[in-house]
Image: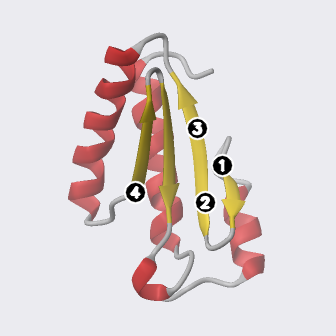
Amino acid sequence: MQKISADRVDDLLKTVEGWAVEGESISRQFAFPGFPDAIAFVVRLGFAAEAADHHPDLLINYKRVRVTYSTHSAGGLTEKDFEGAVAANAAALRAVPMR
């Protein structure tokens, strides 16, 4: 997997609502009505990440989950990171309406 250019990052960022670039990664914080909803989201995302063989960093704080993607082996962002962001957004929509 190849690291993508800054221009490509900018283009892809427009396709994933709520995500922001942070250094060599992209991240987003999701908020849910309660802890069980947050954990259900993490479980759904975990299965999607395993199927894609691309795993995000996750920070769970009660009803908030921060998801961060970066391709460490490429030294930055790749197309796969943005595919993960799409999967995370879809998993959150299946949980409850996003806020």
Residue 52 pos. (x, y %) = 28, 62
- Quarter of the image where one finds residue 77: bottom right
Give the CA separation, mark 2 to mark 4: 10 Å
Give the CA separation, mark 2 to mark 1: 6 Å
Who's the residue at 37% across and 17% down the image?
35
Who's the residue at 63% across and 49% down the image?
16
Q: Please name which of the two marks, 1 or 3, marks the residue nearer to the observer.
A: 3
Q: Earlier in the sequence, mark 3 or mark 4?
A: 3
Within 10 angstroms of label 1, few (less than 14), some, or many (20 or more) residues? some
In the rendered view, tell whether residue 76 sits above or below residue 31: below
Within 10 angstroms of label 3, few (less than 14), some, or many (20 or more) residues? some
- The residue at which mark 3 appears reads as 29
Pointer 3 with pointer 2, Cβ within 8 A = no
Pointer 1 with pointer 3, Cβ within 8 A = no
Q: Earlier in the sequence, mark 1 or mark 3?
A: 1
Q: Amino acid at mark 3?
A: Gln
Q: Earlier in the sequence, mark 2 or mark 1?
A: 1
Frontmost residue, 45 versus 16:
45
One can see residue 54 in this view: yes
Q: Amino acid at mark 4?
A: Pro
Residue 21 pos. (x, y %) = 70, 61
- The residue at which mark 1 appears reads as 19
